[in-house]
Amino acid sequence: MALVAQVIIRKAPAILLRKVEYGDHDVVLTFLTPDEGKMSAFAKNAKKSVKRFSGVLELFTHLEIVIRQGKGLPYLDEASILSPYESIRTDYLKSAYAGYWSEVTIQWLEEGVPQKRLFTLFESSLAALHDARRSPGTVSILFQLLFLDIAGLAPSLSRCAGCGVDMETLSQAKAFFDLDRGGMVCPQCRGEARHRMAISVGTLKQLRWVLNEGLEGAFRVRFSPAAEREGLSLMERFLPMHLGREPKSLSFLSKIRSF
Amino acid sequence: MNHYPASLKQLIDNLARLPGIGRKSAERLALHILKASHREADLLASSIVEVKKRVRLCRRCFALAEEDYCPVCTNMNRDHSRICVVEKPADMAAIEMSGGYNGSYHILQGALSPMDGIGPDDLRIAELLKRVDVDGPSEVILATGTNVEGEATAAFISEKLHHQPVRVTRIASGVPMGGDLKYVDQVTLKRAMETRHDTRYLDK
């Protein structure tokens, strides 16, 4: 009996996270999809295509893709734009944030594991980033905090990460976050923290509210400029520390902030 | 591969390191060089050595040059009050081929790329800002690519030039010549509609 490799063609919503050139004409793409999580695909002749892929395969675009799965890496047969999120492309700070989220997502995910919640979070975050009324910094705090929650690494904001005492009952203007233990620490446990950050109680309450609300309500939050700076600083130290790797896009963010 | 002499094998290995050249193509090229005359082989070898020895970056615009300044920067017949900003020397060559531009250039040597960690300090952006400040051109044309990296780079430079008394423009993007509208993506088509011009312009 002749063995014929089975070819499966399937359609999926997807967000393009990464695009790597392969030779003179082809590209290897990394997508985030709800049912298969991180997925890589080969787009043959994508660089010179004027019909199939012209202007479609841009980073952070929400697409509907048609994948042909044979042996080895799947081939991208077709892609159509669902939302281009154009204003992200034309704003260097927004594209830097979206690049950072893409990088941490690629680093954290394994291929082929369903990621419905993360897909919804990514899509909602891109839509909020595209919205001119939203502050990109605030959207990035929300993405990182909810990403950590989905990853099972959410910081402990209500109880002391050292002794477990209820932090909400403590009356203090500044609280301390222990980066190693992954949460707030009470005045008694503060001394043991090697990597700690002071954070105002107001910012802490807002972060706690975001975690409690989850994806459904979190995008309604508004941070003051000072709270946004504090929240970003905390998240951009905490997330890479727990992923175990400093994303290149994070150093890019600090470069453009200081240029 | 073992049946080839060591020197030929080494040539195949070296050719196969070039972009877009696989082992089979490398083998074909190596055998072609072997069959060619001594003179042809010497010419090829010496041109590789010469290009490495002589070609450098123009001190003003960072285009490829054999002297301190490139032919465009030293050409007094060109309009030096306009600077066209591109990512790579090949982009400059493409614009020169089009024949639609007679100003000067500034080659950034890449584009901002968050995920590759390429920031403003890795490109010739500071040199461009200094050049605009010192030379005082009338226009800076941002001709970086229309992908995310190119758009982000153009937006970054545009913001940095915001307070300078210079007109900053972005090249148009739209329907390619001979293109079929149904194959054009929605972002390009939207931009083409937004930047449409009066047909009387075409009659002139």
Image: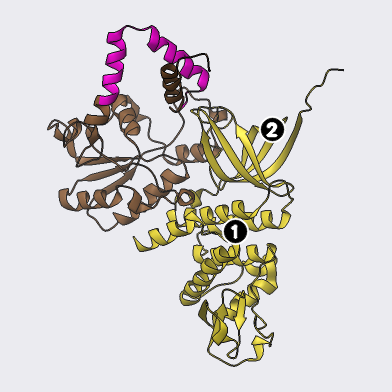
Residue that carries the numbered disc 1 in the rendered image? A125
Question: Given the image, on which type of amino acid does mark 2 rest?
Answer: Gly
Give the farthest residue toward the bottom.
Answer: A171
Q: Secondary structure at mark 2?
A: loop
Question: Given the image, on which type of amino acid does mark 1 rest?
Answer: Ser
How many circles with numbers are drawn on the protein? 2
Q: Secondary structure at mark 1?
A: helix
What residue do we see at 41% from left, 18% from top? B7
Tell me what hue chain B is rendered in. Answer: brown
Q: Position of residue A213 (x, y in %)?
A: 69, 72
Alpha carbon distance from label 1 to label 2: 32 Å
Is label 1 or label 2 in front? 2
- Of residues A2 and A97, the one drawn nearer to the viewer in this rendering: A2
Q: Name the chain letter of the residue that bears numbered label 2.
A: A
| Residue B90: quadrant of the picture | top left
What residue do we see at 66% from left, 72% from top? A211
Q: Name the chain letter of the residue that bears numbered label 1.
A: A
Can residue B204 be seen from the camera position used here? Answer: no
Say above or below: B117 vs A243.
Answer: above
Q: Is residue B44 magenta?
A: yes
Position of the N terminus of chain A by quadrant? top right
Give the magenta range: B20-49
| Residue B75: quadrant of the picture | top left
Q: Position of residue A78 (x, y in %)?
A: 65, 32
Tell me what hue chain A is rendered in. Answer: yellow
Residue that carries the numbered disc 2 in the rendered image? A72
| Residue B8: quadrant of the picture | top left
